[in-house]
Amino acid sequence: MPSSYDYFNRPVLHRPVELTQYASAALSKWAESHDVRLSVGKVGVYWDNAVAESFFSTLKLLLLYERKQFQSKLEARIGVGEWIEAYYNRCRIHTSTGKIPKKAMDDFLTPPTTTAAQAA
């Protein structure tokens, strides 16, 4: 299955294009028999990392590559935090939520705190 080797002549497992191949029982069995640890998410599913990878890719592309530099670590922390809260969570569309911004999806899924009688 490995198509190349690292500097220490160990087989390197390349990420397959097909998710079903990556999460298949055959691949898991092969990895276990060759002492290869597959990347898994918190609950043990292989596709968990897709959303996180998409987030960091977007962060790098839309904030860090455009900005180039921050004057200090504090400025970087504040800038990234503001970008996440002001843009990523509230404005940017997300394919994982049906192309709806996270804030809009949260508002839609959260029941109102006032009842119809209180509103009248």
Image (tube, helix red, strand yellow):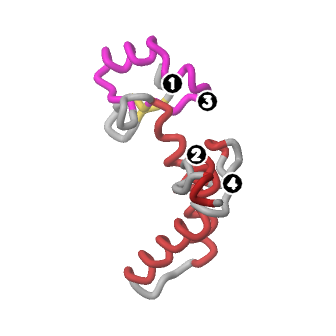
What's the distance in space between the residues labelled 4 and 1, CA to CA? Answer: 27 Å
Identify which residue is drawn at 47% across, 71% down.
Answer: 81
Q: Which quadrant holds residue 21?
A: top right
Residue bearing mark 4: 93
Disc 2 on helix, strand or loop? helix
What's the distance in space between the residues labelled 3 and 2, CA to CA? Answer: 33 Å
**First reached walking from the N terminus: tag 1 or tag 3:** 3
Q: Find out whether residue 23 is within the magenta segment.
A: yes
**First reached walking from the N terminus: tag 2 or tag 4:** 4
Q: Is residue 30 left or right of residue 69?
A: left
What amino acid type should be assigned to the residue bearing mark 4? Answer: Ile
Residue bearing mark 3: 17
- Extent of the magenta region: 13-38
Residue 23: x %, y % from top left: 49, 22
In front of the other: label 3 or label 2? Answer: 2
Residue bearing mark 2: 109
Task: Examine the rendered structure and indicate whether residue 71 appears above or below residue 68.
Answer: below
Q: Is residue 84 left or right of residue 75?
A: right
Identify which residue is drawn at 46% across, 24% down.
Answer: 2
The one nearer the camera, 59 or 18, is 59
What's the distance in space between the residues labelled 1 and 3, CA to CA? Answer: 8 Å
Task: Examine the rendered structure and indicate whether residue 104 appears above or below residue 30.
Answer: below
In front of the other: label 3 or label 4? Answer: 4
**First reached walking from the N terminus: tag 3 or tag 2:** 3
What amino acid type should be assigned to the residue bearing mark 3? Answer: Val
Q: Residues within 10 Å of mark 1 (few under 14, many from 20)?
A: some
**First reached walking from the N terminus: tag 3 or tag 4:** 3
